[in-house]
């Protein structure tokens, strides 16, 4: 409780500081021209080094068409990104344009750090919110104001090592797979040497929500956030949620998966042939297609269905934001407008950056790589479940990680871990 109170207090202080930095959110208007006699440089902050490669190509092409605007792509890791952005927000030095996530949109929007793009979108000939899935644009609409345009969307796939499957005489995963099929394959594909050391794990079930256990919770009919009578409470008290967590944790407990907590580490493990199967999001394509081992040995399939036949794949989408205090609002919007346009989305797809959010452009992303069965990612959107979020996601998601970790390392039962997550999550949701 003391730890949670400290986190809530820190968050409130951060929001206060954010609000104190901004008197009003800037916008582009005819009375505030940012044109200069020489080219200006605007920054674009992202957290994915693989996607950044394609975005840098797009930035150069954009500048070729708009010689008065240079775009500098700034890359950092997921964890560092939010630390740096927080410091930049409180210090008044935000990047001109940057990625935004559902976990943090409420904090930065209500803190006055983001430009309201509502009027810009309404007057644009290239951008219309009707061109994007409604679940994505609503993420970035706070109190009736649109602070971001959807950039992309993603679903989760079951990646597998064809060479290991062939050697074990097991058929590749497909849409007939269930939890039982997955478990049986994981058992057969787990190999130990004479001394009892595991040399090949059947599956990699990471301590990760979006790419891991969230999918199983919804496949089992459980929930992460339960909303009744307009009141949000934790879904981790739901027996269906606990049951799904037990199945998922058992993959680690029974030795078919190693304990894995780091995103970068598990990607390396899979690329080095330590695991026969693993769960990864569609955003990993850029990294996988540049890895010789992956292109030679691996492919991807849809996620298995739950015990009652329910299918689910978590999906989410990033948004392109503009800093409230950018010195170049017109140029920043022109860049974001291009990224959000059909032409920009198609170019992003061709470069394999991510599945573009613009309706009807996902085929170009699928066609960007002939090695992997990429069509399964956009196909899963038909039963996709939006990544659970609320106004305090940044608090309860971190709390859940700490509470649930005990189930994965064996220091808690799954039932106790879910109970602890329920308690801390409800305390967080209650302050919204």
Image (tube, rainbow, N blue to C red):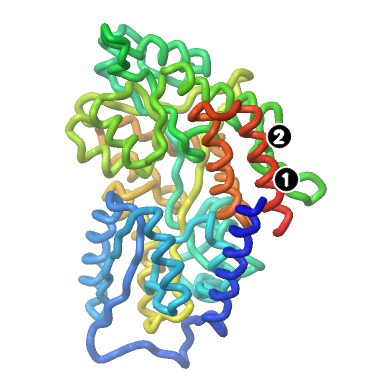
Q: Secondary structure at mark 1?
A: strand
Query: Which residue lies under the disc numbered 1?
Result: 233
Q: Secondary structure at mark 2?
A: loop
Q: Nearer the viewer, residue 431 or 324?
A: 431
Does the residue at mark 2 contact the one at mark 1 (Cβ under 8 Å)?
Answer: yes
Q: Position of residue 382 (x, y in %)?
A: 54, 36
Q: How many numbered discs?
A: 2
Relative side of 335 to 410, left or right: left
Task: Report how far apart the C-alphas of labels 2 and 1 lie in the structure.
Answer: 9 Å
Q: Is residue 313 above or below residue 332?
A: above
Mark 1: give few (<14), some (14-19) or many (20+) Cα within 10 Å: many
Query: Which residue lies under the disc numbered 2?
Result: 237
Q: Is residue 409 above or below residue 356?
A: above
Image quarter of residue 387: top right
Image quarter of residue 268: top left
- Which residue is outermost to the left? 292
């Amino acid at each position: 409780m003391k730890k949670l109170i400290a986190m809530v207090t820190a968050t409130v202080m951060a929001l206060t500081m954010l609000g104190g930095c901004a008197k009003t959110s800037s916008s582009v208007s005819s009375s505030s021209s940012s044109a200069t006699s020489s080219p200006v440089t605007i920054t674009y902050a992202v957290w994915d080094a693989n996607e950044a490669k394609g975005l840098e190509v797009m930035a150069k092409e954009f500048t070729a068409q708009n010689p008065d605007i240079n775009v500098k792509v700034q890359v950092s890791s997921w964890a560092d990104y939010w630390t740096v952005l927080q410091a930049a927000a409180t210090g008044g030095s935000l990047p001109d344009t940057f990625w935004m996530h559902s976990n943090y949109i409420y904090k930065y929007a209500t803190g006055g750090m983001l430009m309201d793009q509502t009027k810009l979108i309404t007057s644009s000939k290239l951008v219309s919110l009707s061109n994007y899935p409604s679940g994505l644009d609503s993420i970035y609409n706070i109190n009736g104001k649109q602070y971001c345009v959807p950039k992309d969307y993603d679903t989760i796939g079951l990646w597998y090592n064809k060479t290991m499957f062939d050697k074990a005489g097991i058929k590749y995963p497909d849409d007939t797979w269930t939890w039982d099929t997955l478990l049986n394959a994981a058992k057969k594909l787990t190999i130990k040497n004479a001394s009892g050391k595991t040399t090949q794990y059947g599956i990699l079930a990471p301590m990760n929500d979006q790419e891991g256990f969230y999918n199983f919770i919804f496949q089992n009919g459980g929930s992460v956030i339960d909303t009744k009578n307009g009141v949000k409470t934790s879904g981790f008290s739901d027996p269906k949620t606990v049951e799904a967590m037990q199945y998922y944790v058992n993959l680690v407990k029974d030795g078919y998966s190693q304990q894995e907590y780091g995103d970068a580490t598990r990607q390396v493990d899979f690329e080095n042939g330590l695991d026969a199967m693993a769960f990864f999001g569609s955003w990993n394509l850029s990294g996988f297609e540049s890895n010789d081992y992956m292109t030679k040995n691996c492919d991807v399939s849809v996620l298995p269905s739950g015990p009652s036949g329910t299918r689910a794949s978590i999906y989410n989408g990033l948004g392109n934001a503009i800093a409230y205090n950018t010195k170049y609002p017109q140029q920043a919007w022109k860049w974001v407008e291009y990224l959000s346009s059909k032409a920009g989305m198609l170019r992003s797809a061709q470069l394999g950056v991510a599945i573009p959010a613009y309706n009807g452009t996902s085929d170009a992303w699928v066609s960007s790589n002939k090695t992997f069965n990429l069509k399964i990612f956009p196909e899963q959107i038909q039963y996709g479940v939006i990544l659970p979020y609320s106004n305090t996601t940044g608090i309860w998601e971190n709390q859940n990680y700490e509470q649930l970790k005990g189930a994965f390392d064996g220091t808690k039962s799954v039932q106790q871990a879910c109970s602890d997550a329920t308690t801390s999550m409800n305390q967080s949701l209650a302050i919204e």
